[in-house]
Image: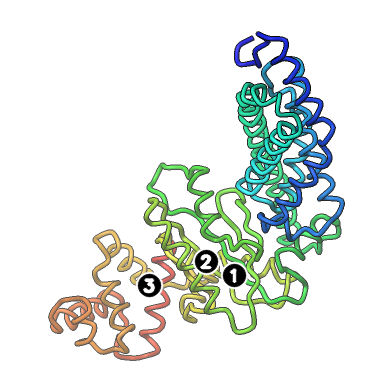
């Protein structure tokens, strides 16, 4: 049989059988030693001081050893079917947060312990030395098939857990957005795990993708945005329809740190060609305020008018806030000549609108505005005069200037 232990001589066969009997007899002892080494060498195992889990690990080792001895005794190569229990053990490791690398390291430790057991058998019966050399290949095949089965089972278990966790997170977020305090135990446990409670300060972050006209967002881009907003173990991040929503716990006095982290995460996406439009709510006292915080975050996002970046409601000016909260009546109050002026200027590139905004941002200092616009001061004066002529507003009077700026922002935002 290809790859299986040869059966050429009766002495050799007898030696193999004696080694198989030896390994079977000391399986529990070798499994116990293997588990002890895992607890000594792998921190992820050592933190679980649980006799039940350690017993499971020893049982897993014994099962792998049995697969080796059975296939060896039957003179055949091991197959995936010889490891039917691997999926259950892999799911357990995933549930405990043990990484794939640590899981595979534990598997290797078990195989080394198995080979040490074979060598101990040779020491007890030197006549089996040649037989031991013949079964090295069988041990390697057991390691290959067993480790492949373990890795595949782990990845399947991890995918299942992630899908289950994502579904739970979506259901939980919908409850919170509807203002319904969660009552189902898994959702309550998830809230506690991510640091969200009725009395813990939080903010809501809402992000969407700035895309060229006609292009739909793909799942990969949404996944990158979700990853950028994710803070493992802290908060809830969910892809919801065409946006990503994050509920972020905020430590006392930590709003600036939270915003810095969000901005850094979003900035990192530029290298992937992903340019999100992100709004951040003000800080609220707990999850009962999430519906209000969500609307704040969406409002902050709208203020960016589709431009990539991060806008926090707490960093918005009163003017920006008023523009975002305006209703149809407010839009109708904008005088026709102002509306016509703004619409025509925006269609031509927005030179006059930008000059007006820069003039106000520079505290009505035309010379400073000119420097920032990279034009001569007389050009700014000329543009301001043209704005006054077209709109009928005196840009030197604060009251009229505020009305004009508000009207310009409303019309610009509705275009």
Q: Name the front one of labels 1 and 3.
A: 1
Position of residue 400 relative to residue 98, above or below, is below
From the image, which quarter does the C terminus lie in?
bottom left
Disc 1 to disc 3, C-alpha distance: 22 Å
- Is the residue under label 3 in contact with that under label 2 (CB below 8 Å)? no
| Residue closest to the eye, 133 or 239 | 133
Q: Do labels 2 and 1 touch, CB within 8 Å?
A: yes
Q: Which residue is mark 3?
A: 408
Residue 279 is marked as 2
Residue at the image position 71 percent from the left and 78 percent from the top: 285
> What SS does tag 2 mark?
strand
- Residue 248 at x, y = what percent? 63, 68
Report the coloring of the rendering.
Answer: rainbow
Number of callouts in the render?
Answer: 3
Q: Residues within 10 Å of mark 1 (few under 14, many from 20)?
A: many
Q: Position of residue 200 (x, y in %)?
A: 72, 76
Instruction: Give the image quarter of residue 314.
Output: bottom right
Q: Which residue is mark 1?
A: 296
State left or right for residue 309 relative to residue 361.
Answer: right
Give me the residue at 70% from left, 24% from top.
128
- The label on residue 410 is none
- With respect to residue 52, does 228 lie above or below? below
Crowding around mark 3 (Cα neighbors within 10 Å: few <14, some 14 to 19, many 20+) is many
Residue 201 versus residue 359: which sits nearer the camera?
Answer: 201
Which one is closest to the eye, mark 2 or mark 1? 2
Mark 2 or mark 3: which is in front?
A: 2
Q: Secondary structure at mark 1?
A: helix
């Amino acid at each position: 049989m290809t790859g299986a232990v040869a059966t050429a001589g009766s002495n050799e066969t007898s030696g193999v059988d004696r080694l198989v009997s030896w390994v079977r007899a000391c399986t529990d002892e070798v499994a116990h030693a293997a588990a002890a080494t895992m607890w000594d060498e792998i921190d992820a195992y050592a933190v679980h001081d649980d006799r039940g889990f350690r017993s499971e690990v020893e049982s897993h080792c014994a099962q792998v050893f049995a697969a080796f001895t059975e296939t060896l005794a039957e003179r055949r190569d091991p197959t995936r079917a010889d490891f039917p229990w691997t999926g259950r053990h892999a799911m357990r490791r995933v549930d405990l947060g043990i990484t794939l690398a640590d899981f595979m390291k534990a598997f290797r430790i078990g195989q080394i312990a198995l080979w040490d057991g074979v060598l101990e058998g040779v020491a007890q019966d030197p006549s089996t030395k040649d037989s031991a050399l013949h079964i090295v290949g069988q041990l390697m095949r057991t390691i290959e098939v067993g480790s492949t089965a373990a890795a595949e089972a782990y990845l399947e278990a991890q995918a299942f857990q992630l899908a289950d966790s994502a579904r739970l997170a979506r259901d939980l977020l919908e409850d919170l957005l509807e203002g319904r305090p969660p009552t189902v135990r898994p959702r309550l446990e998830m809230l506690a795990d991510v640091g969200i409670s009725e009395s813990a300060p939080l903010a809501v972050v809402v992000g969407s993708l700035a895309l060229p006209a006609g292009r739909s967002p793909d799942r990969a881009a949404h996944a990158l945005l979700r990853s950028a907003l994710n803070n493992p173990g802290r908060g809830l991040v969910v892809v919801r329809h065409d946006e990503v929503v994050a509920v972020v716990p905020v430590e006392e006095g930590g709003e600036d740190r939270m915003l810095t982290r969000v901005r850094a995460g979003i900035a990192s996406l530029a290298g992937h060609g992903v340019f999100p439009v992100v709004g951040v709510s003000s800080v609220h006292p707990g999850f009962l305020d999430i519906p209000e915080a969500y609307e704040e975050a969406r409002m902050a996002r709208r203020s960016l008018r589709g431009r990539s970046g991060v806008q926090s409601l707490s960093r918005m000016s009163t003017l920006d806030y008023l523009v975002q909260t305006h209703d149809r009546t407010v839009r109708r109050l904008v005088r026709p000549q102002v509306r016509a002026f703004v619409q025509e200027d925006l269609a031509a590139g927005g030179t006059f609108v930008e000059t007006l905004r820069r003039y106000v941002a520079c505290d009505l200092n035309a010379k400073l505005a000119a420097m920032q616009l990279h034009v001569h001061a007389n050009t700014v004066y000329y543009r301001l005069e043209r704005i006054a002529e077209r709109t009928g507003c005196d840009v030197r009077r604060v009251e009229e200037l505020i009305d004009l700026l508000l009207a310009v922002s409303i019309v610009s935002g509705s275009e």
